Image (spheres, rainbow, N blue to C red):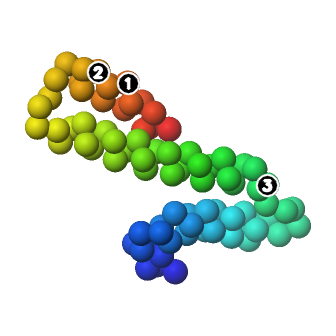
C-alpha cells in the first residue's frame, strides 16, 4: 500500500481509497458519502496539477511580468 503513493498512476487512486477506507472505519454504520469523497479527490488532483503549473512558472528561464501575474493568480488556488 505504501508503494502506491509513489507509482505514477496508482498515486491518483491511493489517496481516494485511503479517505474512503478511513470514512468506513470511523463510521461503519453510515455509508461513505460518495460525492463528498469524489469532490475531495478532484480538488486533491487539481491542486497537484496547479502546483506543477506553478513550478513551471517559477522555473521558467524568462521571468516576465505576465508570468509573474499568472503565478500570483494561481498561487491561492494551490492553497485550497
Q: Nearer the viewer, mark 1 or mark 3?
A: 1
Please give the label number shown on residue 59. none
CA distance separating discs 2 and 3: 38 Å
Q: Position of residue 75 (x, y in %)?
A: 37, 32
Question: In the figure, is residue 40 to the left or right of 64?
Answer: right
Q: Secondary structure at mark 3?
A: loop
Above or below for 60 versus 70: below
Within 10 Å of disc 1 (Cα), the crowding (few <14, some 14-19, many 20+) is few
Within 10 Å of disc 3 (Cα), the crowding (few <14, some 14-19, many 20+) is few
Number of disc labels:
3
Q: Position of residue 74 (x, y in %)?
A: 39, 30
Q: Which residue is mark 3?
A: 33
Question: In the figure, is residue 35 to the left or right of 2?
Answer: right
Q: Secondary structure at mark 2?
A: helix
Quick one: label 1 or label 3, which is nearer the N terminus?
A: 3
Above or below for 35 versus 32: above
Within 10 Å of disc 2 (Cα), the crowding (few <14, some 14-19, many 20+) is few
Please give the label number shown on residue 69. 2
Quick one: label 2 or label 3, which is nearer the N terminus?
A: 3
User: Contact (CB < 8 A) between labels 2 and 1?
Assistant: yes
Q: Position of residue 70 (x, y in %)?
A: 32, 25
**Which residue ends up furthest to the right in the rendered image?**
29
CA distance separating discs 2 and 1: 6 Å
CA distance separating discs 1 and 3: 32 Å
Q: Nearer the viewer, mark 2 or mark 3?
A: 2
Query: In which quadrant of the rendered view does residue 59 lie?
Result: top left
Please give the label number shown on residue 73. 1
Residue 11 visible in rendering: yes
User: Contact (CB < 8 A) between labels 2 and 3?
Assistant: no
Amino acid at each position: 500500500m505504501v508503494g502506491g503513493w509513489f507509482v505514477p498512476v496508482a498515486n491518483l487512486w491511493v489517496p481516494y481509497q485511503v479517505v474512503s477506507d478511513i470514512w468506513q472505519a470511523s463510521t461503519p454504520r453510515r455509508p461513505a458519502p460518495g460525492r463528498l469523497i469524489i469532490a475531495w479527490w478532484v480538488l486533491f488532483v487539481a491542486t497537484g496539477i496547479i502546483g506543477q503549473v506553478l513550478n513551471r512558472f517559477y522555473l521558467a528561464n524568462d521571468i516576465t511580468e505576465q508570468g509573474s501575474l499568472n503565478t500570483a493568480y494561481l498561487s491561492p488556488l494551490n492553497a485550497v
